[in-house]
Image (spheres, coloured by chain):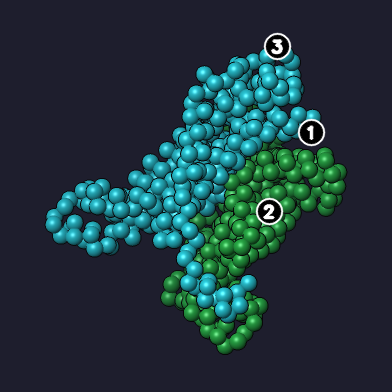
Amino acid sequence: MLRFMRQRLLSTLLTIWATVTLAFFALRVIPGDAITNQLLQGGATEAEIAAHRAALNLDSPLWNQYLGYLGGLLQGDLGRSLLSRQPVNVLIAEQFGATIALALSALGTALLLGLGLGTIEALFWPRRVGRLANALSIVALSTPIYWTGTLAIYFFSTALGILPATGSGDLRHLILPAAVLGFHASGGIARITRASLRHVLEAGFVRTAYAKGLSKWQVLHRHVLRAGLPPVLAVIALQAGFLLGGTVITEILFVRRGIGQLLQSAVLEQDYPVVQGIVVLSAIIYSLVNALADVLYGALDPRVNTDLQA
Amino acid sequence: MTEPDSVHRLLRRPHRQRRHYHAPLAVIMIIVLITLLAPALAPYDPRHAVSGGYLLPPSAEHIFGTDTLGRDVLSRTLWGGRQTLSTALLATAITIIPGLLIGAVSGFTGHWVDRAMMAAMDTLLAFPNLLLALVIIALIGTGANQVALSVGMAGLPAFARVARAAVLDARHRLYVQAAWAIGAPPHRVLIHHILPNIMETLLSFAAVSLSWALLNGTALFFLGFGGDPSIPDWGVMLNEGRAAFRVAPWIALPPGMTITLTVFAVNRIADSWQDALNGR
């Protein structure tokens, strides 16, 4: 197990290094000298541009810049915004808390809904409850976030007036965005939960469990869920990627402070260091979550031989 | 739920009835047909205000009413469908054509080619999908074609992985070994023996890619990365309509419902193909 964890950590670090490298070279090489163009459009003089390029270390050889970038990254330095000239890590840190609060509460909602809907669907399929759960998970997968969000704002804020529509003050502002984003993330979780549980329900050991006289809840609790849930872990980790993207749309829709607004304006203004910083950070979080899910899977499911398969 | 006796029923029950994809396919064909005929069907110019005025509720003259700038919502929905669907189709082509090439070559050749290509795909997969699309937009700028390219590129690594897995699986089957045994050249084995047999897997995932392209493409338009805002797109229309939703829900309803219906139909087709593959 330890060897598996060590190897998984190593491969995660390799992936992170690759994403950082890709992000660095994509932004430096593909658009030519975008930073100069940016400054020229902003009306900077030749001397200012030269000074700025020197400050950004853009006049040294590429490998030198690359090493400098990696070195800075290890110390948490993500460069400076081209527009506000503020350090990117400060810009991100200011917004990070709000986004993480949204992402985590949406994840909680998605887990409750996704596991619940998936289990109901697997157990009660031909009946009405099962069909309803199925329909809900399909709606979650087929509707754009901004459409459900618009409708949710209309019903819960405009019509009923029980929740604030936009803004990011207290917890009440968090409920609607977290519910909408979590609902959409639950679709994928429900699908896999249903498939996994159905597979288990047809297994011989479940029949045996009934045969030896266990009650339906004991069977469900001790046998079905225990065997059926590990595969769901991998999907939950994948939903983390959906959540990281979904927060951008949700934050903009609900006019919440957070990384989303920062990223939207950075992309529109082609403020590369900010975009790069946010995306590299998301890729790191996403890779770590997936590595964690793999390790947990190995711990939960004894059939995964972690010592040999590493 | 299941008492011991109903467990029997559960076990003997035929698997969920084979879902038919004819109904969702018909829905998609109708939507495509209507948007193709938009120039003939649309009663007004989607870009310019009509003389009647703005925020007009639905009436005989304007079936879906008019928007905040006084443009006919029905005409914009019809033309917007052209934009949305063509962006999504272009994005899907950008996903599946290189994705299939990379996956097939990778799975078929193996060795270092496979490892190098899959390492590249895994690096792309390490970025959350929508954020990868946003980086590409930041690099190449805004616009409808740019949205298609970025959404397509963001979907590429997943498709390449699926294609590779399918090719790898087929490579060890008896019929492929038989093809080698009778001396078929590699390209013939790949094109005539492997590809036809994995076509259903690929089509099913292509439908999934299309539904991602629809959702992500309209999301990018919604976020304002589609360039010229006067070009109607369902994502753009929703962004304009949501601000006025309280006073004029008729602006956002048509694009909201049509996106949902389209993605829903595409997902149903993907599901039914997937079920058929799994022998359900």
A304 versus A187 height, above or below: below
Give the residue number, with chain letter if any, for mark 3.
B51
Whole-number angstrom distance, CA of label 2 to CA of label 1: 24 Å
For the residues beneath circles 3 and 1, the answer to whether they share a chain is yes
Name the subunit of mark 2: A
Classify mark 2: residues with Cα within 10 Å, few (<14), some (14-19) or many (20+): many
Looking at the rendered structure, the secondary structure element under dot 2 is: helix
Image coordinates for residue A133, horizontal then vertical, percent? 63, 58
Name the subunit of mark 1: B
Q: Which chain is green?
A: A
- Name which quarter of the figure residue B276 lies in: bottom left
Whole-number angstrom distance, CA of label 2 to CA of label 3: 43 Å
Give the residue number, with chain letter if any, for mark 2.
A182
Looking at the rendered structure, the secondary structure element under dot 1 is: loop
Three-letter amino acid code at the position of disc 1: Arg
Q: Which chain is cyan?
A: B
Image coordinates for residue B130, horizontal then vertical, percent? 57, 44
Q: Residue at x 24, y 48 (%)?
A: B192
Q: Which mark is residue B246?
A: 1
